Image (cartoon, rainbow, N blue to C red):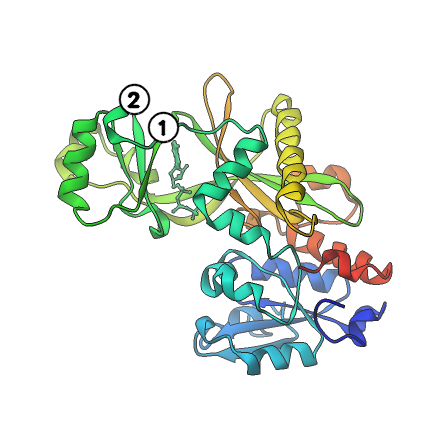
Amino acid sequence: MANGSPILSASTNLNDFVIATIGSHSALQILKGAKDEGFKTLAICKKGTERVYDKRGYGVADEIITVDAFEDWNDQLEEELIKRNAIIIPHGSFIAYMGHERVQSMKTMYYGTKEILEWESNRTMERQWMEKSGLVLPKIYSDPADIDKPVIVKFHGAGGGFGYFIARTPEQFWEVKNKKHPDNNDYAIQEYIVGVPLYAHYFQSPITGELEIMSFDKRYESNADSIGRIKAADQLAANIHTSYTIVGNIPIVVRESLLPKFLEMGENVVKVSKDITANGKGLFGPFCLECIVTRKLEIFCFEISARIVAGTNPFVEGSPYTALKYDVPMSTGRRIALDIRQAIEGGKLEEILG
Ligand code: ATP
């Protein structure tokens, strides 16, 4: 057994396991989904946030472990988790707090492929993965002098796209860059795609071998989604700079004719992920392709998220897509738990642990 307690993790009894995650991001649907599939649940909470997850709030956690800060993840905490035979479900905040390097050395059972996190977090590697998968990508400008159409300038590690800016010419680029970010040279210049943002949520099961589209969302971003509420002249006068801090997520149902393309894109990303990971397990479980769809219905993809995204949160009761496939409300959180349940009951737990 690669992870966890060798004796209990060979068990085919759900009662011998606990589904655990940190109390943030998409923990509510992950833990609710785990309970619906018959698991005991545990939330690791930052002091002061417990009431969302325990009986005072939504009651999705049977047990809470409180920490001062998620960054304090330590051996003692891991011991507690291993003792309970916990299976950790990673989500966006979990990866952000832990960092992909620390995740590699975790000893607690972990749902998903750890190795894929490096491919997701390194922009060059991520682009290689996306290119090999045949996705249509926004052009990258390595030299600002080549800017010949609108571009979005992205600073690495800029939370919520803070400081991103749009430029149309090399002169505009240097003007904003020198004025606002004189010392920051860690950026990528990407073709700005005019279209609507669309985030496609997938699930790839190693147990059934199937790829499913779970749902779609768009993000509600401040102040990118508020600037359009005032007229252009006022936008200029107010000197507002666009930021993309996510405030919430809005469900989307796409034109049905786009579904074959989205399925093909997801399948290719999974196929290539098996080639680029050393153990060949590739990407499985929930993932998201972050896209912009143009007026010609061309789908540009600008990022892969190799884990559950918060855009699945509106679908605690399932989505129009999962309603077509399942007879019970199937959130992405519950789909993860179903995968784990089937793996445990089928004696295939190792297949879903990274
Ligand atoms: P993360 O998703 O890793 O948290 P972030 O939110 O900081 O990153 P991005 O997701 O890269 O930043 O992008 C922020 C916003 O910019 C999103 O609204 C996205 O739709 C938009 N965007 C990103 N790349 C492009 C592009 N090439 N063309 C048009 N819009 C883009």
Q: Which picture quadrant has residue 227? A: top left
Residue drawn at point x = 66 percent, y = 31 percent: 263
Q: Is residue 15 above or below residue 27?
A: below
User: Is residue 152 rendered to the left or right of residue 247?
Assistant: left
Say if residue 95 shows up in the picture: yes
Q: Quadrant of the N terminus?
A: bottom right
Q: Quadrant of the C terminus?
A: bottom right
Residue drawn at point x = 55 percent, y = 67 percent: 22
Residue drawn at point x = 78 percent, y = 74 percent: 6
Alpha-carbon neighbours of circle 2 within 10 Å: few (<14), some, or many (≥20)? few
Does the CB distance between marks 1 and 2 fall below 8 Å? yes
Residue drawn at point x = 38 percent, y = 44 percent: 221
Mark 1: is the Cβ under 8 angstroms from ligand 1?
Answer: yes
Tag 2, which secondary structure? loop
Q: Return the residue at label 2.
A: 149
Alpha-carbon neighbours of circle 1 within 10 Å: few (<14), some, or many (≥20)? many
User: Is residue 245 rendered to the left or right of residue 333?
Assistant: left
Front residue of 249/305: it is 305
Front residue of 128/49: it is 128
User: Is residue 295 rendered to the left or right of residue 183?
Assistant: right
Residue type (three-letter) at the residue carrying disc 2: Lys
Q: CA distance from mark 1 to mark 2?
A: 7 Å
Q: Residue furthest top?
A: 296
Q: Position of residue 138 (x, y in %)?
A: 42, 29
Q: Position of residue 58 (x, y in %)?
A: 59, 66
Q: Return the residue at label 1.
A: 191
